[in-house]
Amino acid sequence: MIYELTISSQGQIVIPSAVRKHLGIKPGNKIKMRIGKQCRVSTVTMESPTSWVARVNGIAKGIYGKGERYIENERKTWES
């Protein structure tokens, strides 16, 4: 189904309530849009405000080795 979106004078997009309900969009959600080469919207993805936690979880895993060893080495540098 194709929905018509309205652009306000301030450049805001009004998403029809049927689309918001179908996608589960709530106030505060962010929507990312990718524009294809022919200026058509190819994908629209939605992420919740807290999804950044899931995205960065474990991103630095293994960089410092075991945490306890890293902390011990850091404490030794404080004393010298």
Image (tube, grey):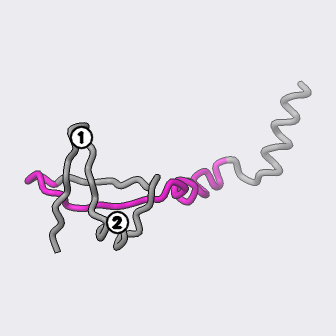
Which range is magenta? 36-63
Query: Residue 33: image x %, image y %?
Result: 27, 54
Compared with 31, 17 (above or below) is: below
Amino acid type at mark 1: Gly
| In magenta stretch: residue 44 | yes
| Distance from the alpha carbon under mark 2 to that under mark 1 | 19 Å
Query: Residue 48: image x %, image y %?
Result: 48, 58
Q: Nearer the viewer, residue 65 or 3?
A: 3
Query: Residue pushed farthest top?
Result: 80
Q: Residue at x 45, y 55 (%)?
A: 27
Quarter assignment of residue 16? bottom left
Q: Residue at x 56, y 60 (%)?
A: 54
Q: Is residue 21 left or right of residue 57?
A: left
Query: Residue 40: image x %, image y %?
Result: 13, 56
Q: Is residue 47 left or right of residue 11?
A: right
| In magenta stretch: residue 76 | no
Please name the residue that numbered disc 1 is placed on: 11
**SS for tag 2?**
helix
Q: Is residue 23 left or right of residue 56?
A: left
Query: Residue 22: image x %, image y %?
Result: 34, 73
Packing grade of label 2 (10 A; few <14, some 14-19, many >=20) is few
Please name the residue that numbered disc 2 is placed on: 20
- The quadrant in which the C terminus is found is top right
Q: Nearer the viewer, residue 40 or 20?
A: 20
- The quadrant in which the N terminus is found is bottom left
